Image: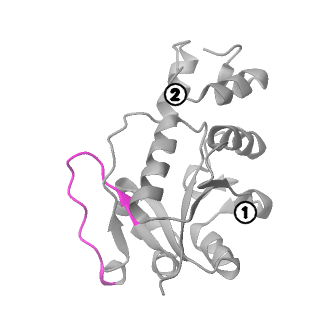
Amino acid sequence: MSRRRIGVFGGTFDPVHVGHLILAQEAVTRLRLARLLFIPAARPAHKRNRRLAPVEHRLAMLRLATRGNPSFQVSRIEADRGGISFTAVTLEQLGRVERAEIYFLMGQDSLEEFHTWREPERIARLARLAVLPRGEREAPPLSPPLRGRVVLLRSPRIGISSTEIRRRLRRSLPVRYWVPDPVLAYAARHGLYGIRRPR
């Protein structure tokens, strides 16, 4: 009997947007996941110099965005641990409590830089890597430890990013339909990203 599967979707989610949600639902369907955990980083190792919205706000926005989908769950594991967030530590911690096969979602650009991550071989031992290809780019050649541990996850192309959303908000351009309405309302209520009212 095969073990149940759970997905792990890590990131800053600063802010969460509809692209995240579409990709997450696609992963649940195509990988036959029992559930998918959204795990916002407390302090991402690769974005130490960028100012982020406080993790409590990012958690609250994720809860609003995922409310009503029984396959989605928001995890505080990295927020509660604090400090710099390392994927290997998170996956090891999850593995101690989850009796499941873990799939870690990542973009193709992250796979291309995976050798620069902290303990990439340990990550690949702890979880299968569900990789979202970027456009027409070919997947990079895989090193021996990764062979058999990577699953390419074909998904719709969504040209939305949190970076672009923040850029548009700085220029007072609308982002409605890019971000769920409850998330925009929350951001406006708390003065995040310079929003003064829902757009």
The amino acid marked with disc number 2 is Ile
* Alpha carbons under labels 1 and 2: distance apart: 26 Å
Considering the whole magenta stretch, tell me its main secondary structure: loop
Identify which residue is drawn at 58% across, 39% down: 16
Q: Which residues are magenta?
A: 130-144
The percent position of residue 199, horizontal first and vertical second, equals 60, 14
Q: Report the side of 107 relative to 97 (left or right).
A: left
Q: Is residue 135 magenta?
A: yes
Identify which residue is drawn at 46% across, 43% down: 22
Q: Which mark is residue 77?
A: 1
Residue 94, quarter of picture: bottom right
Q: Which residue is mark 2?
A: 165
Q: Report the side of 79 relative to 47 (left or right).
A: right
The amino acid marked with disc number 1 is Ile
Q: Is residue 143 magenta?
A: yes
The percent position of residue 194, horizontal first and vertical second, equals 67, 20
Residue 188, quarter of picture: top right
Image vertical order of residue 176 relative to residue 71, above or below: above
